[in-house]
Image (tube, grey):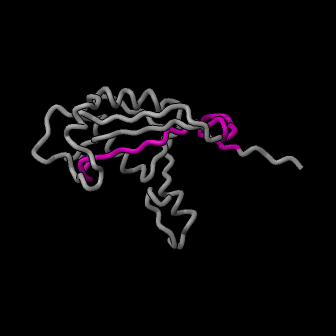
Amino acid sequence: MNAAVPTTHFAGGPTTSIDNVRFAVVDTETTGLSTDDDRVLQIGVVVVRGDGSVEREFVTYVRRLTWGFGHVGAFHIHGITRRQLRSGMKPREALETLNRLIDGCVFTAHNAKFDIGFLQSDSTRLQVPLTLTGPLCTLNLSRKLDPQRTMSHKLKDV
């Protein structure tokens, strides 16, 4: 008996083996929770195929030209210092690099709405169009696999 190769269908595209689908797994660290008042401090991306092979990894701090006093946010959560931010990319450069990395990939994140909200906010502010396919939210997937919510769905636990 032959096992069928799992396939997935994306709107407008052909049916493709999941092994050939590229996922851009993205995580951001921010100064807070408000897309209006807070900013992205760090962007991390791992581009991986459905078969698990890693194509590329990228991480950068996002350097800002000005910071209000203490406005690096909750250090106890993200652990990022002003000194580390000085070595980062400028926001426009970081977004342009992110766009190149996620091109042709399914945007994947844990609580994707949060990451996308901040990235789109910066994108709008800097007039750098952000092109996303997806998103695929691992928080939503985790919750669907555990509808009774008997387990933790935090990123570190998933």
Is residue 57 or residue 8 the one in the foreground?
A: 57
Residue at 11% across, 43% down:
68
Q: Position of residue 147 (x, y in %)?
A: 54, 69
Residue that extends furthest to the left in the rendered view of this protein: 69
Relative placement, left or right, of 81 versus 144 is: left
Q: Is residue 40 magenta?
A: no
- Asked if 115 appears above or below 102 in the picture, the reply is below
Residue at 44% across, 56% down:
155
Relative placement, left or right, of 51 versus 89 is: right
Q: Position of residue 63 (x, y in %)?
A: 24, 33
Q: Position of residue 156 (x, y in %)?
A: 44, 57
Is residue 80 or residue 138 the one in the foreground?
A: 80
Residue at 36% across, 39% down:
43
Q: Which residues are magenta?
A: 7-35
Q: Is residue 29 magenta?
A: yes
Residue 59 position by quadrant:
top left
